[in-house]
Amino acid sequence: MDNQHTIAIFEALSSVVRLDAFRLLVRMGKEGMVAGEMAKTLTVSPANLSFHLKALTQAGLLAVEQQGRFQRYRANIPVIVERIP
Amino acid sequence: MDNQHTIAIFEALSSVVRLDAFRLLVRMGKEGMVAGEMAKTLTVSPANLSFHLKALTQAGLLAVEQQGRFQRYRANIPVIVERIP
DNA sequence: TCAATAATACAATACTTATTTAAATAATTA
DNA sequence: TAATTATTTAAATAAGTATTGTATTATTGA
């Protein structure tokens, strides 16, 4: 188990905005949600959400798919599950 | 599941010093370790370790027991385990 | 009781992270 | 092609966290 990655994951989930964003995507399942809709749902500014989505994505917790001018985010469930021994 | 507590736990484990301290105590099992020995093992100053142990304890991840002039810390394993559904 | 030791508390400083606003980029539609 | 929309980036600032050094508290053993 990679230590640095473990810290990155804990770190990624240690802010209210990021934990809320991640939970939202877990709830949305494989449908996921586009960034703008997430910002409205979570009532945070698009720029601020983008900042946090980037952190979550870099920690490997989210996957992004471009759909036209939308960015659809999905929770990367396996990353969490495989960390539960 | 208490949201705030979940964040507190992630937060508590999102620093290198704190994750190292927690892991050390998990390894030590029910024997635990006194603060001074932990500081030597982890090569951080006693004052700094004390700061982090306080955070871990407040998040409920550690238990402390006074033994004379020593403070023996132990990992509170159930708190983590019961969070894995 | 006094000196030594273990740990914590406090204050100052250094460092990181979060938030906001404005601007830039890129894709769509009129 | 121009205007619009979705998102990200950048810069500035605000807010929060970590580290260090020193002082304090509490306990033990001479």
Image (cartoon, coloured by chain):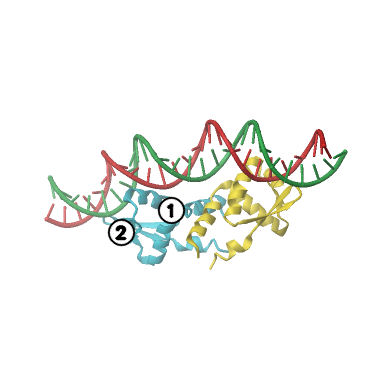
Chain colours: A cyan, B yellow, C red, D green
- Which of these two is toward me, B36 or B54? B54
From the image, state whether disc 1 or disc 2 is nearer to you: 2
List the residue tagged with mark 2. Answer: A37
Q: Amino acid at mark 1?
A: Leu
Q: Residue at x 33, y 48 (%)?
A: A47
Q: Secondary structure at mark 1?
A: helix
Q: Position of residue A70 (x, y in %)?
A: 29, 56
Query: How far across and how far down the image is residue B12, in percent?
Result: 55, 52
Tell me: A45 left or right of A18.
left
Tell me the residue at 36%/51% (across/down).
Answer: A49
Mark 2, secondary structure of its residue: helix
Give the camera-side residue of B66 and A41: B66
- Residue pointed to by mark 1: A56
Q: Which mark is residue B38?
A: none
Label 1 marks a residue whose chain is A
| Position of residue B15 in the picture relative to residue A48 (left or right) | right
Residue A72, horizontal then vertical, whole percent: 33, 58
Chain under numbered label 2: A
Circle nearer the N terminus (1, 2)? 2
Q: How many marks?
A: 2
Residue D30: percent from left, percent from top = 88, 38
C-alpha separation, residue under disc 1 versus residue under disc 2: 17 Å
In percent of the image, x 41 and y 54: which residue is there? Answer: A17
- Residue B44 visible in the snapshot: no
